[in-house]
Image: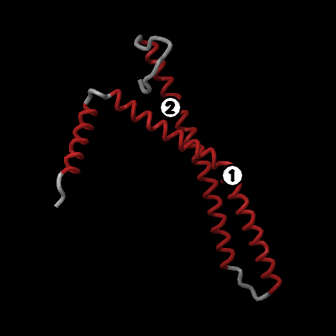
Amino acid sequence: MFVRGYYPYDITVSPNYELTMIGQAIAGAYSASIYSSVDSFVAMLILHACGQISNLKNDLREIHSNDKIDLQTKLKKIVEKHNYINRFAETVENCFNIMLLIQMLGCTVQLCFQAFQTIMVRKNSYFSLNLRLHERRMLQNNSSPSA
């Protein structure tokens, strides 16, 4: 089983075990695609804002003009574009701030539970033996006097 847990049916018999494994694999694939698509969408919005700011910087570098009216017109357009980019960035932050915090906290808790489950499942296995040897080695290195 990918995920150990309580199931209201016997998972040791042949068709139930395979169907449960397939269901867990499909659920894992959907979860991974949803997490990555939301993160990719937010990253794309942030990169879009960064690109717009970079374009604005290039417009400011090329603003030199001898005509005062033309200079004021260009500067006015740059200021309007800057205000638009600031509003866009603020909208992105307000829309996704809480959602990303909840996602980060949820993933952290999920990772802790999965690590705990991995350690408990493999309590008397090769993984656990390596973990204990590594802990013992770390404790010996920390307790030995440093030169």
Residue 132 occupies quadrant: top left
User: How many other residues sit within 10 Å of disc 1, few (<14), some (14-19) or many (≥20)?
Assistant: few
Residue 62 located left or right of residue 112: right
SS class, disc 1: helix
Q: Position of residue 105 (x, y in %)?
A: 53, 42
SS class, disc 2: helix
| Residue lying at 77% horizontally and 68% vertically, measured from the top left | 80
Residue 131 occupies quadrant: top left
Residue 41 located left or right of residue 5: right
| Residue lying at 64% horizontally and 58% vertically, measured from the top left | 48
Cα distance between the residues tagged 2 and 1: 29 Å
Q: Position of residue 137 (x, y in %)?
A: 21, 44
Q: Position of residue 139 (x, y in %)?
A: 23, 45
| Residue lying at 55% horizontally and 33% vertically, measured from the top left | 30
Question: Pointer 1: what residue?
Answer: 94
- The residue nearer to you, when weighing 84 against 55, is 84
Residue 137 located left or right of residue 70: left
Precedes in sequence: disc 2 or disc 1: 2
The amino acid sitting under disc 1 is Asn
Q: Which mark is residue 85?
A: none
User: How many other residues sit within 10 Å of disc 2, few (<14), some (14-19) or many (≥20)?
Assistant: some
